Image (cartoon, grey):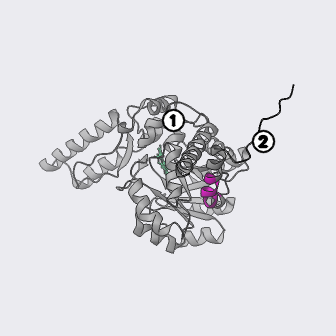
Amino acid sequence: MATTPLRPQDSRPTAEETGRARLDALMARGAAFLGARHAIMGGAMTWVSDHALVAAISEAGGFGVLAGGALSPEELRAEIRATRARTKQPFGVNIITLHPAFDALVEMVVAEGVSHVVLGGGLPKASAIKRLKEADIRILCFAPSRAVARKLLRAGADALIIEGSEAGGHVGPVSTQVLAQEILPELAEAAPIFVAGGIGHGALIAAYLEMGAAGVQLGTRFVCARESRAHPRFKQAFIRAHARDAVTSVQLDPRLPVIPVRALRNAASEAFVRMQREMIEKLERGDVALEDARLAVEHFWAGALRRAVIDGDVENGSLMAGQSVGMVRGEQTAAEIIAELITQAADQLAWERAKAV
Ligand SMILES: Cc1cc2nc3c(=O)[nH]c(=O)nc-3n(C[C@H](O)[C@H](O)[C@H](O)COP(=O)(O)O)c2cc1C
């Protein structure tokens, strides 16, 4: 028997609906820029971000970015086509300005009609920016400081990614929260700014959005997506690790410069320190030329990320990971990861709203 409600049903939005509406409003600019449902980018990760992961992230309402750092123009073209075969949703392509075939990569993305390019590895050449702009491709660049952020916008970048030192992979010296404070208040109106590095929970996404970010970019949280091709041993290392295990590579002597990379501590990272110590001793004895010692340090990690991600050699390879690795608790689909982040962010906003009333 149907029951009659004692009083008319409450038509006010629930706290959850309020949180979701607020989140959508805060993400609106970033989502429109990306053409995605949510302003959450799955950052390009060399060897990890292939067509399967990128398509899964974009299908789930995020914005996947294909990693082009280790691919030839033809290999990357094949990845772009394979991604399109799996999703009609937009996605980005990461190209590194230091890539030996950089110009050919630019021509290839123009020919393929890619919608968004994420340029990594330093200031792009003016000619490349011009070429991409003529082709109506949206350009996102990494800004490791306020000065560089301003310069990139003047040079024609359409949006910026500010990535702090908590992130996995190659990192700058400044933390995400300091970069956010330095850059968002001044530049968030001028261009969409996406915040990256150390984000593992939706509550922090809400906080950066409230500071003026257009959206966020996460890498580490997506490594253990079910659709990620990373070797099961690579994923296991992530699932077991705590935040403190993701450390930056150590430089022992300024004569032998080390590019800082954040990765999980393993046998290779210890061997790297031993090797530097040996090189310093040899330098002091005059047993090795400075140039050769530098090359030994530079080449130590060559091929190491592939060894770990693809071959599963988690002791001798590079386990690039950010500090948010402690928040990776198991394999989840990309859709589950995005849904979880969105719920957490909306809950945070709903809770703040409830506190304010
Ligand atoms: C294994 C790994 C590989 C990465 N490779 C690249 C890359 O090739 N190009 C790039 O622009 N960023 C790369 N990144 C950075 C990510 O795109 C992303 O910005 C970063 O992971 C965000 O910080 P988080 O790890 O704290 O989420 C990599 C990160 C990881 C963990």
Relative image position of residue 131 (x, y in whole percent): 60, 70
**Mark closer to the chain start, 1 or 2:** 2
Task: Classify mark 2: residues with Cα within 10 Å, few (<14), some (14-19) or many (20+).
Answer: few
318 falls in the magenta region: no
In the image, taking residue 112 as reference, residue 157 lies left or right, namely left
Establish if 99 lies above or below 302: below
Q: Nearer the viewer, residue 137 or 22?
A: 22
In the image, taking residue 300 as reference, residue 21 lies left or right, namely right
Question: Of helix, strand and loop, which mostly describes the magenta segment?
Answer: helix
Q: Nearer the viewer, residue 357 or 353?
A: 357
- Going 83% across and 29% down the picture, which residue do you hit? 3
- Disc 2 element: loop
Q: What residue range appears in magenta?
A: 22-31
> How far apart are labels 1 and 2 at the CA level?
59 Å
Task: Classify mark 1: residues with Cα within 10 Å, few (<14), some (14-19) or many (20+).
Answer: some
Q: Is residue 37 visible?
A: yes
Q: Amino acid at mark 1?
A: Ile
Q: Which residue is mark 1?
A: 310
> Nearer the observer, disc 1 or disc 2?
2
Q: Which mark is residue 8?
A: 2
